Amino acid sequence: MPEMPEVETIRRHLAPQLEGRVLETLDVQDERWSQPLAGEELSAAVQGRTLEQLDRRGKYLIFVLEDDVHLLVHLRMTGTLLLDPPEPTRFGRVTFAFGGGRRLVFDDPRRFGTGELALGTPAREEFLARRLGVEPFSPDFTSAHLYALTRASRAPVKAFLLDQKRVAGVGNIYADEALFRARIHPLRPSNRLTRAQVDALRDGVIESLSAGIAAKGASIDDFRDPDGVAGTFQDRFLVHLREGLPCTRCGHTVRKLRVGGRGTYVCEKCQPRPRLR
Ligand SMILES: [Zn+2]
C-alpha cells in the first residue's frame, strides 16, 4: 500500500511534466472512483482548466486547477498513476488527457482508489482536516506537538502512528522504521512515552520518511512510479520485513509481531518490550 513517500515520489515525478498544462479531458471509466459524484459531473468540474500545481497532503495527491478547483486523488491499496503508458493498461479506470498530448492513467486492480472534488480552498482544507492530522514535514510537527498528541492515547504507539488523524502519511513500513530508529517498542502505550522518546520518535518519523523519498519509495507490492519503475527503499529497510534476520544495529534476531492487526517488525534488544501493568 503506498504511503506518503510513495505518493511524494509520484508528485515529484509528475509535477514538472504536467504543471502549467490544461487538463483537456478526464475520462472516468469506473464510476466507483468518483463516488458520490457521477464520473461526468466530476469531469465537467475539472475539464478545460489549467493544472496550476500538483500538491500532496498525507497520502492525497492534489491536482490544484485553475479557479481554485481541487481534485484529491487517493491510491488506496493498489492504485498507480502511469504517465504516457505505451500500451493500454490492464486495470485503467480513469484517463487524464493534458495539453501537449500527455496522458495520465489511474490503474487500479482492486478498485479502492478514489478521486474527490473540492471547490475552493476552504472546502479543500475542511476535507483534509476531517481526515488528516499533522503533516510530518510541516513546521507544526514539533516534538511538543507530538508529545501532546501522545498524552491523549493509550493505544500502542505503532497503532497511534498508523492513525492518519494523528500523524498524516505514516503507514506500516515507515511506522516500523521510525520506531526502530527511535528505539521504541511498538507495543509501548503512547501516553507512557517519555519526552526523550517522543523527541527520538519525531526525528525517527522524519528520517524514515526522508529515506523513503530519497529511495523513490518502497516497492514491496504494486508500487511503481509514473514511468512504471519500482522504488528501491525495500532494499534499505532497517527492520521492516527482516523477520529472522540479524538486527542492522546490534545483530539480535528481528521478530515479527502483530500490532493493531498489522505485521510489525522489532528488535527487542534495541527496542525493549514495555512491562505492561
Ligand atoms: Zn538491535
Image (cartoon, helix red, strand yellow):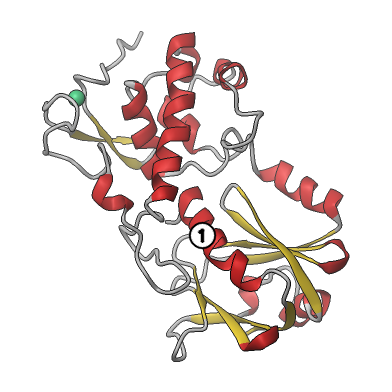
How far from the left and from the top, in percent, is residue 116?
A: 71, 64
Q: Decide if residue 3 is in sight here.
A: no
Residue 58, horizontal then vertical, whole percent: 59, 47
Left or right: where does residue 66 sit relative to residue 244? right
Which of the two residues, 41 or 269, is positioned nearer the viewer here? 269
Which residue appears at 56% of the width and 52% of the height?
59
Say if 219 sits above or below 98 in the image: above
In this rendering, position of residue 149 left or right of residue 234: right
Of the 4 image quadrants, the one containing the C terminus is top left
Total marks placed: 1
What percent of the width, then of the height, locates residue 19? 68, 69
Horizontal placement of 137 versus 273: left or right?
A: right
Disc 1 on helix, strand or loop? Answer: loop
Relative placement, left or right, of 241 versus 171 is left
Q: In the rendered image, which quarter is residue 55 located in?
A: bottom right
- Residue 26 lies, in percent from the top left, at 70, 81
- 152 or 23, which is in the foreground? 23
Residue 268, can we see it? yes
Looking at the picture, does residue 246 appear above or below residue 172?
above
For the residue carrying disc 1, how many other residues have a C-alpha within 10 Å: few (<14), some (14-19), or many (20+)?
Answer: some
Q: Which residue is mark 1?
A: 76
Q: Residue furthest bottom?
A: 87
Q: Does the closest atom of ligand 1 sit within 8 Å of the Cβ of label 1?
A: no
Query: Within the displayed image, which quadrant is ligand 1 positioned in?
Result: top left
Res 65 → quadrant: bottom right
For image coordinates 73% across by 71% down, the residue present is 20
Could you tell me which quadrant the N terminus lies in? Answer: bottom left
Residue plotted at (52% across, 83% down): 84
Query: In this picture, is 238 found above or below 111?
Result: above
Residue type, label 1: Arg
The residue positioned 42% from the left and 85% from the top of the image is 90
